[in-house]
Image (cartoon, helix red, strand yellow):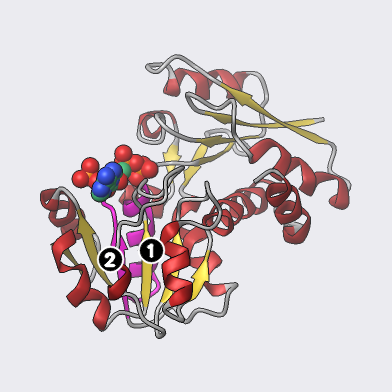
Amino acid sequence: MDVYGLIGNPVEHSLSPPMHEAGYEPLGIDARYVTFEPGSDAGASAVEAAQTLGVSGLNVTIPFKQDVLDAVEADELAARIGAVNTIDFTDSSPIGYNTDAVGAVRALREHDVEIDGTAVVVGAGGAGRAVSFGLADEGMNVEIANRTVEKAHDLAADVPRASGHSLNELGDLLASADVLVNATSVGMDEDRSPVPADALHGDLAVLDAVYSPIETRLLKDAQAAGATTVDGAWMLLYQGVEAFEIWTGRDAPVAKMNDSLRARL
Ligand code: ATR
């Protein structure tokens, strides 16, 4: 039996185990997906331990996404982002990937959103960083707006075709934007949006990285404005689908994984 897992702290409420395990049976894969909660300074040593124990693949979440860089060979995108969320132990040395970036792009694309023109990314933390690189690598211009404006400028300096802004500029930025991504935690378990409702319009596609609640205040406002909306569970799904495909080398049973995820939201 193959063992896959997630390291993070905390991980007890993670939806990754049921999502991944829903993908094994349809493909006849004999595997389990388990969670591990190392101490907050033990991310890199947990990766070494997993390799020693013959674990096939690990996902990595907060607070270890940067720490594990020391314990893996990061692929080019993960190295540029500076964070790893997926580790493959198939080769003699563990390879680190970042599927958050591609997951966001794929969530949009699967909803027929054209990845072209200008994207506004709200948030310059870990999620904002991955999403900004993902969209820029697809050729989009990326306008990064953040509460702490210096962090937006710092991130924009690393990302091709990007610039940094304050949240006050969102109205102007969105007027000519094609895609909006909320990569802040605003709206998580609260009825609040990081974007003024009157800045939204019908030519936008809006992806919210927040998936609790599934229909956030931002997505409700976006729907009312006639925008295309993509909820955060799609982003969670596709970062998992990408990891599944790296590990197994097979097309993931996306519908099954999605059903399992949504049944728990
Ligand atoms: P993650 O890895 O999930 O992105 P993070 O690195 O802690 O988490 O980043 C959280 C993001 O949400 C940041 O962009 C943060 O803005 P600051 O850089 O100014 O802290 C943003 N954020 C959190 N609470 C916010 C709030 N109340 N209003 C606006 N932005 C907020």
Q: Secondary structure at mark 1?
A: strand
Tell me residue 68's x, y (percent): 41, 30
Q: Is residue 179 left or right of residue 15?
A: left
Picture residue at 15% right of the left edge, 58% below the top: 157
- Camera-near label (2 vs 1) is 2
- Disc tally is 2
The disc at residue 181 is 1
Q: Is residue 166 left or right of residue 102?
A: left
Mark 2 or 1, nearer chain start: 1
Tell me residue 239's x, y (percent): 55, 52
Tell me residue 223's x, y (percent): 48, 73
Identify whether 264 is placed above or below 224: above
- Camera-nearest residue between 29 and 206: 206
The disc at residue 196 is 2
Determine the quadrant in which ligand 1 lies: top left
Amino acid bearing label 2: Pro
Look at the image and give the residue range highlighted in magenta. 118-141
Name the quadrant containing residue 106. Answer: bottom right
Picture residue at 41% right of the left edge, 84% below the top: 202
Amino acid bearing label 1: Val
